[in-house]
Every structure is written in structure tokens, then in C-alpha cells.
Amino acid sequence: MSVKESVSKYIQRRTSRIPGEFKRLWKNYIYQSFFAACMLAIVLLVLNMENAVVIASIGATAFIVFTMPKNITAMPRRVIGGHVIGLLSGSLIALIPHNGEFSCILVYALAVGLSILLMVALNFEHPPASGTALGVAITGFSVTVLIAVITSSILLSLAHRFLRRYLRELT
């Protein structure tokens, strides 16, 4: 069997696995992915790569909101509340002195643990928000991060609220 035939068979195998839902909802897949990309572009306009962990957590939130809109973690209250808790947890824990590698590991882990504890205790569970806590603990609090996280959380929540009837479960 030639390389060309092998590649052709591989592609056929992969495309045959495309679920029927994709074939039926392909427009949703395209525009929901487009909206998620637009939301992340807004965040990238405000933040720089120094805040990569926070950007990644907002990207994960965009995934949840636009691919799993009926999921409990996509609820606006949880998106906004979770990221606010992540900001607060990361900011608070960043105040703990940490210079060595081991102390950094402990402090960053503590930021994630505290965010989980508070989100669960206050009923604002939103898993990507623990990434916000980690990112803020690593880089420290800044007004830019505060504005970007709050703005993106609100925009994603508004998009969820106003586009909900058009959003389909894609997972």
C-alpha cells in the first residue's frame, strides 16, 4: 500500500467518525466557534502574554459557554462569580511572600485550592476560574487583569443570555 493510499484511508476513517450531530448542526459549530474566538480576541486586546494563564482560563470559559450552553457551569452567575472568586483568591494568595521554587509551588497550589473551596462553598462553581486564581497568583494583581477578567466574564455571560436560544449543545 502506498503512502497516498494510507493517508486516504486514514482520512476516510477520521471523517467517518464525524458525528451525525455535526452534519446536522454544522452552522452552529461554525458560528458558535466564531463567537468564542471573538470573545477571546477582546481579552487578547487588553491582556498581554504575561497573563497567559488568565487568558487560557477565559478561553476555557468561552469553550463552556459556546459549546455547552446548558451546562450548569455556563450559567452567567457562575461564570462571573467564579472568575471574581478566582481574582480574589489569586490576589490574596499573591500577597504571601514566595521566592524559592518550592514556596512558589505551594503558594500557587494554595491559590487554586482556595478558589475551589470558595466557589464550592458559595455555589459559584466554574472550573476555569481556578485558572484565573493561578494566573493572578503567578503574575500578581493588576488593574488590567481585573478589567479584562471582569469584562470578559460579563461579555461571555451576556452572550450566553442573549444568544442562548440560538446556541446548541455541541458536545
Image (cartoon, rainbow, N blue to C red):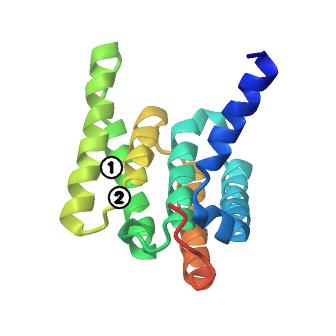
What residue do we see at 63% from left, 62% from top?
22
What residue do we see at 55% from left, 57% from top?
63
23 vs 45: above or below: below
Q: Is residue 13 left or right of residue 85?
A: right
Considering depth in this image, is 37 or 132 the residue closer to the camera? 37
77 vs 14: above or below: below
Percent x, y of residue 33? 68, 60
Check whether the beta carbons of the residues at disc 2 and disc 1 lie within 8 A of each other: yes
Percent x, y of residue 79? 44, 66
Can residue 32 be seen here? Answer: no
Q: Secondary structure at mark 2?
A: helix
Q: Amino acid at mark 2?
A: Ile
Circle 1 residues within 10 Å: few <14, some 14–19, many ≥20: many
Q: Which residue is mark 1?
A: 89
Residue 85: which disc? 2
What residue do we see at 55% from left, 64% from top?
170
